[in-house]
Structures are given as structure tokens and as C-alpha cells.
Image (cartoon, coloured by chain):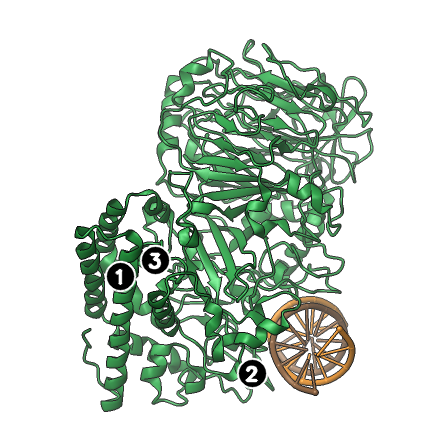
Chain colours: A green, B orange, C brown
Amino acid sequence: MTSYRVDYLTDSLDDTEPLPELSFEDFLEPTSDKSSQHMEIEALDSEEDDGGGEDLADPANDSLNTPQFKKNVVHILEDKRLNSPGLTVLKSHAIKVVTAGGTPPAKAQVTDVKILNKLKPIPSSTLKIGSTTIATKSTPGSITKTLSNLTQIRTKDGQVIFVQKSVPGTQSSTALTGSPSSGIRRLVAPSGIQKAVLSKGVTMASTGLVKAAVPPKASTSVPGTAITIKGIQPLAGGTAKASTVSTPATTSGSLAQPTKIQVVRTADGKIIKINQAGPSLLMNAKQGTGTTVTPGGSASTSVKLSPSGNVVLNKPIGQVVVRTETPVKTATGSVASASATPGKMLVQSGGKQILVSNKNIIKLSPNASATSSTTHTTGGQTPSTSSGLHAIQMPGKGGVQYVRVLNNNKSAAGTSATTSMPKTVQTQKITVVRPPVATGVPATSSTTSAAAAPSAAASKANLPIGSTNKIVMRSMGGSIVPLPSVQTLVSKRAPGAITNASKPASAASSSAPSGSQELPRKHRLTDLNMQLKQSASASSEASDSSDAGPEAKKPRYVITMQQGSQKAASQPIQKLINRPANVQRVVSSSTSPNSNSPKKIYNYVQTTGSNGAKYMICNSGVPQSSTSAMRRGYTGYVENKTRRPPSISSQQHRFKHMGAQQQSKHQQLQAQAKQKIRQQQLPTEQSSPIKVEPKLPTLPPGVKADVPAKPLFEVLKPAATPAAAGAVDPLGGMTSRRKHCNCSKSQCLKLYCDCFANGEFCQDCTCKDCCNNLDYEVERERAIRSCLDRNPSAFKPKITAPNSGDMRLHNKGCNCKRSGCLKNYCECYEAKIPCTSICKCVGCRNMEDRPDVDMDSLDGLMGAEGQKKDKAKNKQSNEDHANIYLTDDVIQATVMCMISRIVMHEKQNVAVEDMEREVLEEMGESLTQIIAFAKEKHETSQIDESKPSS
DNA sequence: GAGTTTGAAACT
DNA sequence: CAGTTTCAAACTC
């Protein structure tokens, strides 16, 4: 045990450890071969028996073919990071149980039982579900495959349980509990469980029992304790079986009644409330300080589970804060256990889990309204109360980030718009906050078990954010979802483009004439300059929309700091927010005049992997502007590498919370530290936008006026350092989501659908018969597979940069015949990249150097000369131009100038805002000079290569 | 807002 | 792989 514990702790602390690379497919495919992390136990796999012919080998098939549920698989998901040598420690276990009367659950309610406790698989590998025994493969006898997709397990009682790998359907909540006493943890399943999906640490033993070993709690529990799942009852009959177990159980106070929520004390001493009736619910049973669920009242630390299985905050406004290593506090009243082990958080989607990171605190705020973005969901994925939860990361005030948990309505068909009301009510926000200090202050929670105490220190917060079969975010080791820095991109695109359905008028404002398409493209530098000017002149939220002009149509994005306007607002949360490297939070908002327009926020899970595919877990919000280009590839899938615009990451938050002086110092340090990096990157970035998207700001353009709050260097910061952000900082790639789709015949399951093509779920779209949502997970997966079959790269970015500094290129090239590649019909044009020799277009006019096509303002200035160069040369010329003028020296000088200002103002105790403004002005001036110089140079000698100095 | 144009995706 | 059809966005009026 000791060793285990040590390892565990160590592991948890190791943030730097690289996260597994995941690809879009990975998300889709729960069982990825690549990851040793995922252990698949196919004990139940009837297919083999059947000779189903399903290729087990192909992990992909697994998930993608979920419709058929061909495999009944028990997945043991290991957290590699947590694994301690020698021992297999399972950080979490998830079991989905669906009760059925013996009929396959097409619509069966799925109960998700998730055991977040670390469990150590029992050698015996037996699981016991109630009286029902699930035998491993070895004991086929007990398992009967009734359906192709399900494994049927017959209980002693004669009940039949279907076990399947993942459940499309839905969820009903179940409870977990651990009983310390015997060292056995028991899971109480709600009645009516039909299916059981074991995701972690659960082994099926021939013994007929499903057992999972309970990891040794820090000190107390015995390692190997088995987990018993009880209460599975055959049918829907549903009597909820409360039976459970646990020990000392504490009371479930308030909840108890109708909903049948039980409180169980885990071996760790944690108390968990279980709501049996509700949809899936995640519960963390980690060791750590025991958290208690107290009935509403007392302290804050309790989490209440709603009947629906959702976490419900009693008070509309209250917040639940989960701190690592500390108990969770809930304003409202109930709570889930907050114990925590240092761990990572998993983001689970469709059976896939991604390890996100740890050590964060989560704050839950019931207040749905806070973020405008998500509320509007309609259609497909509307979050609904009944179904699972789905987390959306949202911008918070004062830099606080929120993860909003939305209910997914399963019951309501995908399209069914759930009632809006429930949404708001149920939607929860989770704010991830960095834990104040390791010392866990057990906030309110009355710790239940003494035993837990010992481990308390070690324990970290767990976060049960929500579960669904869809997307589940949960903290593994007690950490929560690390939210990467908050970066907000604002689309500067003309309103016209932006709005949803209608925004006619607005369009007019900025947008150029319809012909605007052919207007010169705006480039980053240009944008930057403009922005800088704006910011200089007016610090506040100048709406970018103003710049509409010719560029109106072109989507542009500005990075805004969350603090932005909000800076004034106090920031309740003082700590840093860390996001896992692979999870990005993207907030996009249109800069359109409508400042009101809600921002969209996305959680990206971006793989660091080779393909760079990213998966957008959720997006919500309001109609956003985005061009098809985005959907056509960049937005959806962008490679990390290329997408690393100056990421604003967690550091931003730090700044926010830092004192002014500290900030400035920090800025200096940061600037200096990264100066070189930037020197290298800046030029290249400018010349060659990130493949992600033109829409993405590569530069600080972000300096949106309204967001003075953000430190300049933060903005400028090239890319998060690997350490901080993980290998890749996805943020850069953030893009705003494209406009909502309007598919009518494809059910949003074909690449015609931008949402689908981007790996996003439709939300707030106006599509018809949409299946691109969690309610049609099966269909969706099937469609995805189909697309991948046709084109393995279907979900990969269409536009990429061969090399980090290279200009983006369209991988396939366009095939335009009549548009001259000067309309947005052309993917190249839309992506604001010149056509290349790869393209098969006819009559192409999308040449890089064309004045009217200017790809980059700087380039335009310098590149006026060449009208139409060979396409093949475009790229090179671009780079050359940028490199000629934006040399390291120039950049360095610019940076130094900015630093000088900082230093100067710092000495003068100038307000941070003012200082930032000054710095921005400095940068603007510098850029202006650079451009002027470049222009002059160009005029005098087109070939001049001398390095300009600012 | 309806109708047309366009080119990618899907299909044959 | 080429040709055709389908589809949804972009565009026009």
C-alpha cells in the first residue's frame, strides 16, 4: 500500500507528464488500442463466442459501431499517470448498468455507475453485482449473448442483465458507495438496471462476482477490497433498490425521500449521496477527506443529487466549489464528495476518456445565466435535465472559469428542444479554480469518516461533474478539469457573417458590399494594428465591429482577455486555473456591434498527437460567425502545432490575480523568458498564419481594446510553454465555431454538415432531423466511421502548415471552376490562403500576392510587386517577406521597448491598466514603424533584404 | 426570405 | 478514378 500511495501521490503531482495523445477518433473510440491506458476486458464479449466476426482488433470499430453494441466489453480504464508500478491502480471505475426485463434495451434506461475511487483490480477479477454474477469469458456459462450487441447475464434470480460496452442511451443515475467496513465497496444500482458497462477497474470474474478492488486508501482501507454492486434488479420495475449499503451510512438527509438518494460512506470515509432514480451520475469516491453530504443545510459541503441524477444546486445562485484536496463547498447545499486524490480528470465522451489533468478546483455555480453562451441550446443537444450532463466551459467573470454542466436530454430526442426552463435550472456551472493551497480546508463538509482523515492531505478534489454517457468530465485524482487559460477570441468578422439567421442590418454596418469577398483580405498585422490603435484610443470594449469595412466579411478574431471588461469585477477566484493541455476553452464572441451577443464557448480536446485532430466536446452558445472554412477543417480539426497562437493560458489568470506590480514583474520575466521564442515565432506566425485558421489570431491582436486587462505579454506570449500547457497549447487554435448549420437532408451526419465535419455536435442549429447530437450517438458514430472509411483524413484539418513556420496550405486543394477562387465557395479563399499547385481550380485568381487578396497586410505591403507568382512559390514568398522585415532583431527591439515601458511604469506605480495600455501603444507604434519601414523599403528596392530596425 | 450558384461530399 | 448526384453554404435579388 505504501508504495502504492507514494506512487499515487507522485503521479498526481506530476503535471508535466505528457498526456496521452488522442485523436478525434480516439474520442470516438472508447477503446483505443493505442493506449495502454485503456484496458479492455472483453470477458463478456459474446462476440467472440458468437463468432460475431466483429473485429476486435479494431478498436475503432468498437465504439463506432456502437449501434450494434456488438461487443460487450468491460473496459478498465487506467490512468496511466496514476499507475503505480506493480500495482494497477484504477483511478476510476465506471459502470453503466442498464436494467432490463430481459429485453434488450433499445431504450432502456442506462444507469451509470461510476466509481471514481481508485480501485485496484482484484486479482480474482470477480465482480459481483448484487446477487448476480457476471462471469468472465472464462465462464461463458453465465453469460448468454442474447443480442448481437448485448451480453446478457442471467442473475441468480433469473433476471437478465445486459452488459454492453457503451450505452448510447441514457442514463439514469446510480449510486455508488463504498463501505469501509469490509473493505468492500458496494455499488448500489438503481432499480431497473438493464445494462452494465464497466469501464474501469472492474473485472469480471469467473466467480460470478463483479469485484473491483478498492485501492488502498491512503491509510485506511485495505487494498484490494472488492466492490460489490448490488441492487441490480431486473426490470424496470423499478423499484429502486436502495438497498445499499454502506456502512455507516450517513444519512441522507434532505434528499432521501422520493428520490431515494442514499448516502454512503466509502471506505475512505467519504460520504456519497446516491440518487438512484436519476440519470447517470458521477460520484467520486476518492479518498481524501471525507466529504460528507449533509443535508442541505449545513454546510456547504454537500452535494445534492437530483432525482434526475443530476447534481442540483438548491440555490439558484449558489456555487459549488470543489477544491482539490479540500472538500467541496456548495452554496446551495448539497454536495458531492469532494475528496480528492490528486489525480487527473477524465473527460469522457462517448465512451472515450481523456485524461485531462489535475490539481484544480472546480467551482460550481448554479447560476446558469451567468454565461450567456450556453443557455440557448436548442435542438439537438439541448441540455436537458433528464439526461446526462454535458459540460461546457464557460467564461467567468473575473477570469473565473466555469464549466457548465448541461443536461443532455436523452429522453427528449436529440432534436427535441428540451424545455428551456429546466435547462436553466439544472444547468450548472462549474468553475474551475485553482485550489488555494494544498491544505485542504474542509470547507463545510462534515467529514464522515475518520479514516478518511489520514488521507486527506493526499486527497484531492474530485469532481463529479456530471455524467452522461455522452460526455463525462470527472476528476480522477481529485483534480478537476484543468482549464487552460482563458482565451477569448472575438470574431471580428462582420456581423453579417456572424449572426445566426438573421442579422441583416448588422451586416450592413460593417460588411462590405457583397462583393466584399473579393476585397482584400485582412491580415493579422493589419488587424493587429487596427486593434492596437483602437485599444490605444479607447481602451474599452471598442467594438471591433466598427472595422467592418471591406473586411467586414472576413472573419477575424481577436483575443480578448476575459478580464477584459470584467477586470473591474472582483474575482472571486483567486487561483489559477489550469486546463489540461488538451482541453481548451474557447470563447468566441462576435465583435459585432452587438456586444450582447453571447459568446460561444467550446471545450476542445485537442490531441497532441500526430494528426492534431481535435475534438470539440461541446459548444454552445449563440450563433457564431464562422465561415465554412472553419467547418471545413480548420475549426474542427487543427493541428496543435500550427495552432499555437500566442496562447493565453493559465498565466492569464495568474495575472489577473496578481497584484499589479507582481504582474508587471511577472510580465517582464515572462516577456524576457519568452522573448526569444517569440522572436522566432512572431515572424513566422505572421507571415504564415496558423493553420488553424486565419480566423485565429496568431498574434496579440488579441489585444482587444476592451480587454486591457490582459497583460501584453500574455497576449503576445507565443505558445504556452510545454510544461505549462502541456505539449501543445491548443488555445491557439481556438476558433470560433462556425455558424450553425442548416442541414435538412443529411441529418447532420455527413460532412456536408459543418458541425459534424468539425466534430461538433449541433447545437443551436437550425438543422432538421439532426442526429448530430448525443441522442443519436450511435448513428453519429456510425456516420463518423463511414466518413472515416471513405476518407481516413475526413476529420483532419484540411488546412495545415507543413511545418510550424510554414504557411498554411489546403491539403487537398480546391477544385473551383467558376468562382475564380475568389469567393467563399472556394475553401482556399475562405481560409484566406492562396491556391497552390495542389489545387485543381480553373481560372484561379486566388494568388497570394494579389493586392486584392492580400493574405497578410505586411505581405501585401511588401508583396505588391508580384502579381501572380507561381502558386508554388507563394508560400515561400510569403515567408520571405515576413522574414525580411520581422526579423528577430526587430521583434526583440519591439519587445524591449514594451518592456521598457513596463519597467518605467512599474516604477511609477502606474495602474496596471494604464501600463498595459502603454505597452500596447508601444507595440502599436513599433509595428507601425515596422510596416512603414517595410513599405518604404519595398518601394525603394523591392529586393531589399536588409533588416529594418524599429 | 426565396431562389440561384457553387463546389465539396457522396454516390455510381 | 471519373462522372454524376446530392447537399448545404454562399451568394444574389
> Disc 2 to disc 3, how far (Cα)?
32 Å
Q: Are marks 2 and 1 on the same chain?
A: yes
Percent x, y of residue A300: 52, 24
Percent x, y of residue A446: 50, 16
Q: Are marks 2 and 3 in contact (CB under 8 Å)?
A: no
Q: Chain of mark 1?
A: A
Q: Which mark is residue A513?
A: 2
Dot 2: element: loop
Q: Earlier in the sequence, mark 2 or mark 1?
A: 2
Question: Looking at the image, can residue A716 be seen?
Answer: yes
Residue in front for this viewpoint, A68 or A620? A620
Percent x, y of residue A426: 65, 38
> Disc 1 to disc 3, how far (Cα)?
11 Å
Q: Chain of mark 2?
A: A
Q: Amino acid at mark 2?
A: Pro
Residue at position x 43%, y 83% in the image: A871
> How crowded is the residue under tag 3: few (<14 C-alpha within 10 Å), some, or many (20+)?
many
Tag 1 residue: A919
Percent x, y of residue A379: 71, 53
Q: Which mark is residue A715?
A: 3
Q: Are marks 2 and 1 in contact (CB under 8 Å)?
A: no
